Image (tube, helix red, strand yellow):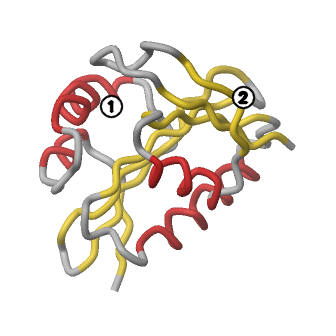
Amino acid sequence: MIEKRAFSASDILTMDYYDKTERDWYSASINQFAKPNATFLRCGKVVACGGFVIKYPGFAEAWLFLSRCAGSTVVEVRRQMDQWFEEYRLVRLQAVTLASWAKGERFLEWLGMDFEGVLRKSSVDGKDQCMYARVR
């Protein structure tokens, strides 16, 4: 069973996450500016954390951390994303993933986002990222 609760930055630290450098940076800063947000749990274990950063009316950036064992939780994450997209009347929602991580790119496409380009040396550790967006 999948549960949802309000996000806390410490939730990210409990996850079995792929990139610990990025995880540590985000967990230290994300709680200051990210609303709406949520933490998803399966069997009492945190498997996903995500939310939107509303830049201005109609425009937001999405962020998401999935644990290695997120599995079918992604369906609930998609439902929540779609709900927030409508609730906040977004015209544009954008997200980035590492350019070297094809699985992340496929996931953003599954969420209904389109590839827009490469942001060179834009990650916390200087790696290239791919920009995706969902535009109404």
Callout 2: SS: strand
Seen in the picture, residue 9 relative to 105 is either above or below; the reply is above
Residue type at tag 1: Asn
**Which quadrant holds the N terminus?**
bottom left
Q: Where is residue 83, by image quadrant? A: bottom right
Task: Tell me which residue sits at (43%, 25%) in the image.
Answer: 33
Determine whether, in the image, residue 52 is placed left or right of residue 87: left
Residue type at tag 2: Phe
How crowded is the residue under tag 2: few (<14 C-alpha within 10 Å), some, or many (20+)?
Answer: some
- Give the residue number, with chain letter if any, for mark 2: 59
**Which quadrant holds the C terminus?**
top right
The foreground one among 20 and 88 is 20
Coordinates of residue 122 in the picture (x, y in percent): 44, 15
Task: Tell me which residue sits at (34%, 56%) in the image.
Answer: 66
Q: Where is residue 26, by image quadrant? A: top left
Residue at the limit of the structure toward the left, as seen here: 14
Q: Mark 2 or mark 1: which comes first in sequence?
A: 1
Callout 1: SS: helix
- Give the residue number, with chain letter if any, for mark 1: 31
Task: Tell me which residue sits at (45%, 32%) in the image.
Answer: 34
